[in-house]
Image (spheres, grey):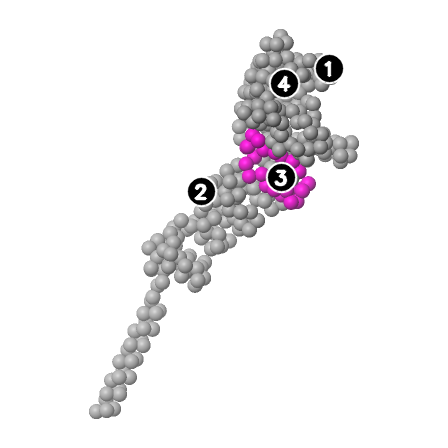
Amino acid sequence: MKKNRIILVIGLLCITLGCIGYMNLNYDILARNTFVTKENHDLLIKKLDDEQILYIVENNIDVTEFDEFLEMQAFDFKNYKLYIKVNEVRKAAPYTIVSFVNAVFDKISEDDLLMALQHYDYALLRELIINRSYYNANAAVVLNPSDYMLKLGLANTIGKYEPTDLVSLDDYTEISLLNEGLLLREEVANSLSNMCSYMADIYGEKCGGFGISEAYMSYDKVQEEYTSALSTYGPQIAYENYGYPSHNEHQLGLAIDIELNDGEYMEFTEKYTILKNIAHKYGFIFYTNENVAFSHMKRANHMRYIGREAAEACYLNGNCIGEE
Ligand SMILES: [Zn+2]
């Protein structure tokens, strides 16, 4: 009898262990996450380690939110939230998102990254964050290159950024143009046109005799002019006259260079004095500091748009966008 009882106990034990083993084989921890589907299940198992699986299960993470990124070979679980956020700011193919985030996530804060992405495309921003500038490897990335008050200099860079609201000055009959193909941001062009009307009323000629010789410059154009000046005049003069590519505020579409149409030296003319005293009413300023570490030092012919309110405050109090 005793022998039979022992056999029975051993038998039951074997069945119990067998059941546990069978349950273990078929136990699926992912079943506890309510977002796991037939489609993403195997991919999750393949791409995530045990700790990550446990995390998405315990927190019931909505894994469908990063399904499309999970399919990418370079998917990195630690960046999954950033893939989602970045894609919300600027939609792109999953491959673009994953490779971009993986390349830059540890080189810029999340807030800065999301802000900058509102203005730069992926290729441009990646290049900016990783390489900064040829002329200053430590230059800060300008987070908002569309800011009318942006102080652009050697300490910060916009790379090859192009404003999105450039308009042709050919469409403004009040503005006198000394070169072809000039562009400015729309608000700046409108304001310049109004200022020209005012000058025309005083002097009875288009824009009071002032013409625009330069306005928006693309990165390539600045590069071309800088390189040409560099070989002709050397680095100091090339920098002073053209600024470094990716640091030149003409790239912002907020700066213009002016001349008198008749070629007269304008600085000591009455009309130039008038212009200097009314420009702020139209949002423009002239820089006053010879040594400002800026994209432009004081130049009689260089005007910068910063918006009417700011320009009026600047005219009254000085210290225009941080000039020291
Ligand atoms: Zn200029």
Question: Judging from the image, what secondary structure is the residue with disc 4 in?
Answer: helix
Query: Which label lies toward us, 3 or 4?
Result: 4
Question: Judging from the image, what secondary structure is the residue with disc 3 in?
Answer: strand
Q: CA distance from mark 2 to mark 3?
A: 26 Å
Disc marking residue 88: 2
Q: Nearer the viewer, residue 321 or 34?
A: 321
Disc marking residue 119: none
Q: Amino acid at mark 4?
A: Asn
Mark 4, Cα crowd under 10 Å, few <14 / some 14-19 / many 20+, is few
Label 4 sits on residue: 277
Above or below, comparing residue 74 to residue 305 in the picture: below
Q: Main secondary structure of the magenta part?
A: loop
Q: Amino acid at mark 2?
A: Glu
Query: Which label lies toward us, 1 or 4?
Result: 4
Q: CA distance from mark 1 to mark 4?
A: 20 Å
Mark 3, Cα crowd under 10 Å, few <14 / some 14-19 / many 20+, is many
324 inside magenta stretch = no
Label 1 sits on residue: 264
Mark 2, Cα crowd under 10 Å, few <14 / some 14-19 / many 20+, is few
Query: Which label lies toward us, 2 or 3?
Result: 3
Label 3 sits on residue: 156
Q: Position of residue 98 (x, y in %)?
A: 50, 49
The quadrant the N terminus occupies is: bottom left
Asked where in the image residue 293 lies, by quadrant, the reply is top right
Above or below, comparing residue 71 to residue 159 in the picture: below
Identity of the residue drawn at 61% across and 9% down: 202
Residue range corresponding to the magenta coloring: 132-154
Q: Amino acid at mark 3?
A: Asn
Q: Amino acid at mark 1?
A: Glu
Looking at the image, residue 72 sits to the left or right of residue 38; the answer is right
Q: Quick one: label 2 or label 3, which is nearer the N terminus? A: 2
